Image: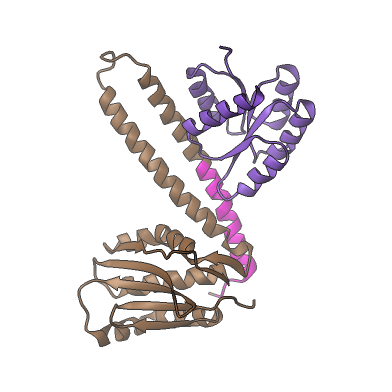
Chain colours: A brown, B purple
Amino acid sequence: MNHLTRKEVAFFGRITAGITHEIKNVLAIIQESSGLMEDILGVTEDGTFPHKDKFIKSLNRIHRQIQRGIDITSSLNRFAHNPDHCPASLDLNEITDQMVLLASRFARLKNVVLESNPSDPPLIIESDPVSLEMALFESIEILLNITDSGGKITLSPRKIQDTCVMGVGYDNTVLPEEDFLSKISSTERWASLQEIMTRLGGAVKVFNLAPEILLHFPESIDV
Amino acid sequence: MDRMKILLVDDEHEFVTTLAERLELRNMNVSIATDGEAALGFVENDPPQIVVLDVMMPGLSGLEVLEKIKAMDSKIQVILLTGHGATKDGIRGMQLGAFDYLIKPIDIDELIEKLNEAIKSMA
């Protein structure tokens, strides 16, 4: 398949962003309807409705899932707006949280826990948001590809000698040091990750001891 | 104490009718409109104290409706409902005279807090 052009990516983004608003409207209606049920239960006298406790428990479950839906669609909405501006001012901490939410299903399918370890203060760079998130996703996929099941992947944005870096660390059974690099560099996605990082004016390195893939980003890029 | 008089405006009919029921349970006097034209009709014929207004609607947008409401009666307070990622609409709305804005889906307690604040500001 040909590479997607920027216009085509923007088209996908526009449609997806529109759909997320529709999903939010659905969630809003479910939220108000379940809230109304809760209100009615609240004004129902004790003892007049024998299943009140079970209803409240079920409504609480609905509320938790609504909140989960809101978090996912909010992240998807931000993701869909990525092609709107390039280069854009990005906080690596925010991008990290967004990616953890969006990629958690891929990790869950391999029983892998995906989490973020944000830095304090914000790490702001000027970059191409679509390519940057692709680089993060490719890194996660590379690590998922080398594991059979289980373990933890941690995204750790931080500064190393004034350079903004994203660490994508893998914590599973201990691998021999030389195995980590040889395993990840044998995956198809490794070449793709290197290509993306070159396009972003950055570099990809591997830290065997952690083990961790380190993505180095420049402060700004020319597009 | 007089019941708070509110107009809810959103093109999602099921959303406004359900929210109206919840506010009525809290002893508020609530009317609903599902488009900007209908909302302006209410403001002209049976003016509310507060309008809770969705920004993204077909036809007249929420911001256009806000401007018209303020031109008709500047004392009416308007609380905007925006989507996530559309906070710039909320900020623009406040520049046009909205009391505040909330992001959908809304939290009922937060809405009630804003309604009370809006009523107090009118005193």
As drawn, A179 above or below B27: below
What is the quadrant of the C terminus of chain A in the image? bottom right
Q: Nearer the viewer, residue A106 or A70?
A: A70
Which segment is the magenta one?
A: A2-24
Taking depth in this image into account, of B116 and A174 the one nearest to the observer is: B116
> In the rendered structure, does residue A23 fall within the stretch colored magenta?
yes
Q: Is residue B70 left or right of residue A190?
A: right
Q: Residue at x 37, y 64 (%)?
A: A117
Q: Position of residue A15 (x, y in %)?
A: 59, 54
Q: Is residue A175 left or right of residue B66?
A: left
Q: Position of residue B18 (x, y in %)?
A: 50, 26
- Relative to residue A48, is residue A54 depicted above or below? below
Nearest the viewer among A219 and A146 is A219
Q: Residue at x 29, y 32 (%)?
A: A57
Q: Quadrant of residue A82?
A: bottom right
| Residue B115 placement (x, y as % from top left) | 57, 27
In the rendered image of this protein, does residue B4 appear above or below residue A185? above
Judged from this view, the residue extending furthest toward the right is B71
